[in-house]
Amino acid sequence: MSEWLAAARAVGIETASRHANEVDAGARFPVESFAALKARKLLGIMVPTSEGGAGAGIADVVSICHALGQYCASTAMIYAMHQIQVSCVVRHGGASDWHRKFMQRLAAEQLLLASATSEAGVGGDVRSSICAVEESGGRFALAKQATVISYGANSDGILVTARRTPASPASDQVIVVVPRDDSVLEQESEWDTLGMRGTCSNGYHLKASGEMAQVIPTPYADVSAQTMLPTSHLVWSALWSGIATDAVARARAYVRAEARRKGGTPAGAWRLAEAASLLQLMKSNVVAALRQYEAALGSEDRLSSLAFAVAMNNLKTGSSQMAVQVINHALLICGLAGYRNDTPFSLGRHLRDVHSAALMVNNDRILASTGNLLMALREDPELLP
Amino acid sequence: MSSALQARVRAVFRAAEFLPADVDGLANDADLYAAGLNSHATVNLMLALEEAFDVELPDRLLRRRTFSSINAIAEALVEIGVKEDAA
């Protein structure tokens, strides 16, 4: 276990799990978890050592998301979303002085980054923008009707997508790094949801201004295909596997307690085997996609190939569905003890949290996009990459 | 590279709505993504090119760069054996 993973586990056990129920009940930001993650310097680990960071890789972050998912799904999701933003800055900002200085701040101050990609009026298509970067004398101004900015109010900076210029088509987007001091957020909607309640994904009207140098030089289409999309699907799938892992751990504990009490193999044991098999599939899927991403890193062509996009989409749609199945098995194993909210086997929060998986970027939208890509691709006849 | 091939590529654009902009207003080296080509339209464009030129684009050419301009598309077609000046 890496030092970072051990530190994340400690945050999970000592802090996140203790506050998970309150965070969920109150739909409040997990302040305690993030104070602990900041104190252990886990927010800036992906910043390269040349900019004062720890130079951690995607595998480290994926393992941490999986670990945090076992204790508090909201904490894990916020951590995952933050690292998606960090990876965009790290992978695409290296050639820009402004972004290198910002990376140094990420490492030194352990800034928490949020994202404003969704916008009212684009029908949920994050690859289209209405708002635009308006330049004047090396400065920009930007106003966005952001339907969701998860933990926006608790963040230290926001990455905002917008059209490159007011004359650009909707799909010609850039992504701008906006430190919180450069932005004004007016809250327009509340986040009172079934699960993932601690992410505080309120809607805001965002106004930002700053230097043109804050715009990431790579077109957002490339940032999205090469970094944001694969990183998102990896870290999300990892944390959903984490939620499922804890559900299976609870089911296992339940079956073991039954066996101890009554002797023999309890009725739930075969279903536990079914759940464990599905969980293994989920984890294998994450690890295989992680290795595929690591192998493609450094090759723009491989990262922007259609086959790679299909593989990452499949990871997301597959993991999000399997996570619900695993938790359903766990619930049947634990029975009413799992259904109640006050036992060591309670699974209500797991189930509510994991139902967000198919919706955060709706699986139907992803499947439609994958279906479109599949028309262009031929089946890979090989087993090994 | 011959402009006959680019003209045939332009004809493929004219036959469908891959771009919000008029293809005749774009130079051969103009960035099609900046002109509004999105990923969904790219797949349909690729299928239309395969139909129009009676070719199959191999997976290695199915990447963003292949469709980034009319010139890039023409180069990819030449690479898989389409004659530059065949009418």
Image: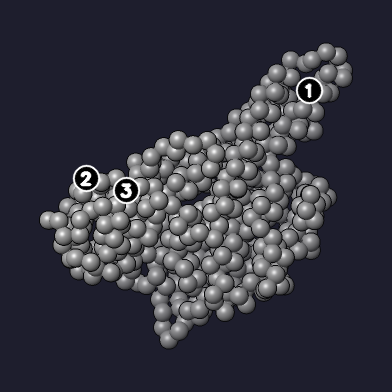
Q: Tell me if residue A202 can be seen.
A: no
Separation (CA) of disc 2 from disc 1: 61 Å
To which chain does the residue with label 3 belong?
A: B
Say what amino acid the circle numbered 2 marks.
Answer: Asp
Residue under pointer 2: B54
Please indicate whether residue A272 sits to the left or right of residue A376 in the image. right
Q: Secondary structure at mark 1?
A: helix
Residue under pointer 1: A255
Question: Which one is in front, A250 or B68?
Answer: B68
Q: Colour scheme of this structure image?
A: one colour
Residue under pointer 3: B57
Q: Secondary structure at mark 2?
A: loop
CB atoms at circles 1 and 3 under 8 Å apart? no
Q: Residue at x 69, y 60 (%)?
A: A56
Q: Residue at x 55, y 35 (%)?
A: A321
Question: Which one is in front, A134 or A307?
Answer: A307
Say what amino acid the circle numbered 1 marks.
Answer: Val
> Foreground mark, 1 or 3?
3
Say what amino acid the circle numbered 3 marks.
Answer: Leu
Looking at the image, is A309 positioned above or below residue A283?
A: below
Q: Quadrant of residue A79?
A: bottom right
Residue A330 image offset from top left, x and y in percent: 69, 28
Q: Secondary structure at mark 3?
A: loop
Please indicate whether residue B28 sits to the left or right of residue A128 in the image. left
Label 2 crowd bin: few (<14), some (14–19), many (20+), radius 10 Å: few
Residue A6 image offset from top left, x and y in percent: 80, 52
Q: Residue at x 47, y 41 (%)?
A: A363
Q: Residue at x 73, y 60 (%)?
A: A42
Q: Are marks 2 and 1 on the same chain?
A: no
